[in-house]
Amino acid sequence: MKRIVCAPLFAALLVALPASAAVQPGKALDPKETKADENYILPPPEEVFSALKSASKVDFAKVAASFAKDPNTGKSKFSSDAAKAANLGMRVADAFIAVQAKDAQALRRASDVIEVLSLELSADLSMKNKIAVANKLADEGKWTELRTILEAVRVDVLNELKANKDKDSVALATVGGWVRGLDIATMALTDTYDAEATKLMRQPQLVAYLKRQLEGLGAKAKGAPFVGKMIAQMDAIEKLTTIDAGADPHTKPGGGKTMSKEDLQKLNKISGELVAAIAGA
């Protein structure tokens, strides 16, 4: 089974490396590692967040605490399945951040939304039990076990959507999680700017793939205003994340160029606007 690997992803913080494949600090994922495959839709797994944490001094507790100040992070009522899917992806990203921060309240806030939206989209009643277990583990501080449960939830949602042949929801959940991860990553890297760490943002191939996913949506999903806003910004995002992987005289030989703080701020502004558009759908 292939996986979409999101490096900025932290920028997208976003998506999946096998548990055995930890990313080295400051090392951008090679384009060959990006797999354009629908088998994985939801970000981000733990390894990607761990790479961000290793590459830069990210205060995940501060990030998770900021979720409580934003009423949209607990919102679960949306006007369409397209909006539900994109927001589902965003809250899965929030759940993994909560684990990094070891914040049980942030985890519960995200899991409550995940439960509602996953049930509405897939009607998988087993999801309720898994989320109850996840919340219990968080309350008990069993974060290692919780990571396993969250991954199971992520994969189960994906499998249900695929079983229902709901390709649009699969694509939008993927992009929603990616946008949320991009917003969080760029915010974190801007606050604690480290030129070497910005190499994690190098992923134009992934952006191009997600753009194709958006452009391939059905007419109903594609007609959602927030989808139009995402499509309109993909070229700008792709340009900003196209960081030269060749030698740069200002960095280590062969290390490739880095992203300026100004470009990070531009990327954060774009991703923040898209997150707001998705949450407001």
Image (cartoon, rainbow, N blue to C red):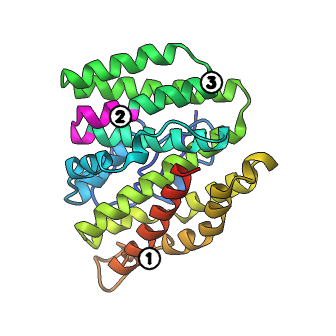
Label count reads: 3
Q: Mark 2 touching mark 3, by CB under 8 A?
A: no
Residue 221, magenta (yes or no) = no
If you read the primary sequence from the N terminus, does the residue marked by circle 2 or circle 3 appear first? 2
Residue sitting at x 54%, y 45%: 4
Magenta stretch: residue 108 in it? yes
Say which residue label 1 marks.
Answer: 246
Residue 174 seen anywhere in this rendered image of the structure: yes
Secondary structure state at the residue bearing disc 1: loop
Foreground residue among 110 and 20: 110
Under mark 1, the amino acid is Gly
* Predominant SS of the magenta segment: helix
Is 96 drawn above or below residue 200 in the view shown? Answer: above
| Boundaries of the magenta span | 100-110
Q: Going 49% across and 18% down the picture, which residue do you hit?
A: 127
Give the mark nearest the N terminus, 3 or 1.
3
- Residue indicated by mark 3: 122
Q: In this view, does 83 lie to the left or right of 97?
A: right
Q: Distance between the residues labelled 3 and 1?
A: 44 Å
Nearer the viewer's eye, disc 3 or disc 1? Answer: 3
Q: Residue at x 29, y 79 (%)?
A: 251
Q: Name the residue beneath numbered marker 2.
A: 109
Around disc 3, counting alpha carbons within 10 Å, would you say few (fewer than 14), some (14 to 19), or many (20 or more)? Answer: many
| In this view, the mark in front (2 or 3) | 2
Residue 82 is labelled as none
Where residue 194 sits: x, y (%)? 25, 70
x, y (%) of residue 119?
56, 23
| Mark 2, other Cα within 10 Å: few <14 / some 14–19 / many ≥20 | many
Question: Does residue 198 lie above or below 164 as drawn?
Answer: below
Reply above or below: 241 against 85. below
Residue type for callout 3: Ser
Q: Position of residue 272 (x, y in %)?
A: 45, 62
